[in-house]
Image (cartoon, rainbow, N blue to C red):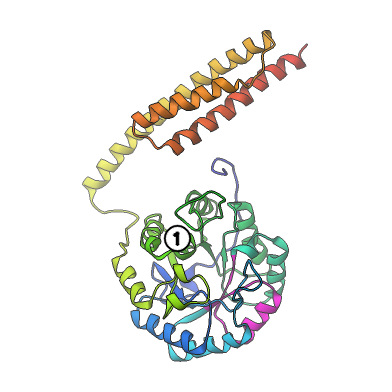
Amino acid sequence: MYLCKAMQSNLQILPINKWLKDSKKPLIIAGPCSAESEEQILETAKAIDAIGKVNIFRAGVWKPRTRPNSFEGKGNIALQWLKEVKKQTSLLTTVEVANAEHVEACLKNDVDILWIGARTTVNPFYVQEIADALKGVDIPVMVKNPLHPDIHLWIGAFERLNKVGIQKLMAIHRGFFSYNKNIYRNIPQWEVPIELKRICPQLPIICDPSHISGKRDLLFDVAQTALNLDMDGLMIETHSNPDGALSDAEQQITPSALHELLDQLIIKSKDSANIEFKNFLNELRNQVDEVDDEILQLLAKRMVLIEKIGEYKRENDITILQLDRWKEILKTRTELGNKLQLPKDFICEILVAIHKESIRKQAEVINYASSTK
């Protein structure tokens, strides 16, 4: 992916505790997928506020739907309902925006935080339009990952906002679209937000387990995994009557279910003061380092053999790709991996990476020989 590339970002990020009061970790954002009525919004917001663990109330005002006959939100009238939420609860409000018109409407109606959705992040033209509308405005903006795992697009959205002066920024990991059948609505691909954190360590990242899960029974596990990976918070879709919701009913939960979920989450520490724990952890890590050294030595030895194979193929006018041999490697190595209790997908990813480098190495040997004739 991007893991070994020397990618850097010079984002100027204002720490979250500088602009959000009571910003204890984890930050919790909750509210319905869509604002459907004033009664629904206020009933849900008051119940969420009573939990005492939620910082921000979310609600979709304009809904980007795949099909035109789907519920597309109530529009500007819903912003009036969110004003009432601020009057009647302690919660801040956040709304998804997809263009300059949405931004202007939110600013006029005192929305506290904006967020850019996955379908908007994917298009730099849309992001730039939003950024231009925010020039000179001091408001926090959250950005969801694009639909596909393109970290450059994700970071690019933050950079566009940063260029117009927005420094109160936060990322939302909501998973990625896949054509393959999966238990998740959007596959987590946790390595992507982890890589974002490596490149932009100062950028807060929260997780949206609702859009990853797509259904209620997976919410807790996804939320707990996000916290285990040291994410800064969660955005969970919560509705006073989720079964009757006009959009994404299957992934929304009631305020009482949210309360139960939050109570069950285990908040883990980054470090421990236990000396015995630290010593044993370091001992295990040293053993891992030794194994990694052995793996790299063996890979280097393998590549020496691959060079020899490339030279031998060149001398005998044999093609680099030998499909039957590649099929044999996949079959025998995955079978061995299975016996060693290693996941098949994990073994396949490793084999594909090694095979890709082997093909490149053989091509390099043959092309070099050709160029020196």
How many marks overall? Answer: 1
Residue closest to the eye, 108 or 67: 67
Q: Which residue is mark 1?
A: 213
The residue located at (61%, 24%) in the rendering is 359
Q: Is residue 213 above or below residue 303?
A: below
> Which of 142/22 is in front?
142
Q: Position of residue 166 (x, y in %)?
A: 62, 70
**In the image, 346: left or right of 11?**
left
Circle 1 packing at 10 Å, graded few (<14), some (14-19), many (20+), is many
* Picture layout, residue 359 above or below residue 154: above
> For the magenta stretch, what is the residue range?
94-117
Q: In the image shown, does 100 or 69 lie closer to the viewer?
A: 69
Question: Taking the image as drawn, is residue 211 in sight?
Answer: yes
Q: Specify the quadrant that holds the C terminus.
A: top right
- Indicate the position of residue 61 as horizontal and vertical percent values: 58, 79
Q: Residue furthest front?
A: 69
Q: Quadrant of residue 63?
A: bottom right
Q: Position of residue 24 (x, y in %)?
A: 39, 70
Q: Residue 104 magenta-drawn?
A: yes
